[in-house]
Amino acid sequence: MKSNYHALHVLKPADPKLLEATILICNKELVNSISQCIQNVSNGNVRLSGCNTRKLRKHKATFRIVAY
């Protein structure tokens, strides 16, 4: 996770086309870091505000596929 911190920080405000292109060419370590973040959120290890929870609710099925 620490080795991919900067890449994750760049991806945070990126538009969807850039995200898709980056994920297609990235290394396995970055994909594992993203998956680990999603797992921590879904397991409740990371607290989210109600607003953030509502925003992520529509992506629940995709997150489950990526996380596991």
Image (cartoon, rainbow, N blue to C red):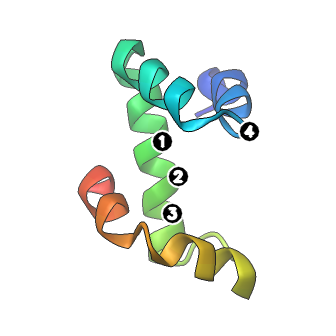
Q: Which mark is residue 34?
A: 1
Q: CA distance from mark 2 to mark 1?
A: 5 Å
Per the model, the C-alpha gap separating discs 3 and 4 is 20 Å
Query: Residue type at mark 3?
Result: Asn
Q: Is residue 56 left or right of residue 36?
A: right
Local packing at callout 1 (Cα closer than 10 Å; few below 14, some 14-19, many 20+) is some
Q: Position of residue 62 (x, y in %)?
A: 32, 59
Upstream in sequence: badge 3 or badge 1:
1
Q: Residue at image x 45%, y 74%?
A: 58
Of 64 and 57, which appears nearest the observer?
A: 57
- Residue 40 circle label: 3
Q: Is residue 49 visible?
A: no
| Label drawn at residue 37 | 2
Q: Secondary structure at mark 3?
A: helix
Numbered tag placed on residue 13 in the rendering:
4
| Mark toward the start of the polypeptide (4 vs 1) | 4
Q: In the displayed structure, does residue 31 sit left or right of residue 68?
A: right
Residue 55 percent location from the top left of the image: 61, 73
Query: Which element type, helix, strand or loop, lies under badge 4?
Result: loop
**Which amino acid does the dot numbered 2 rest on?**
Cys
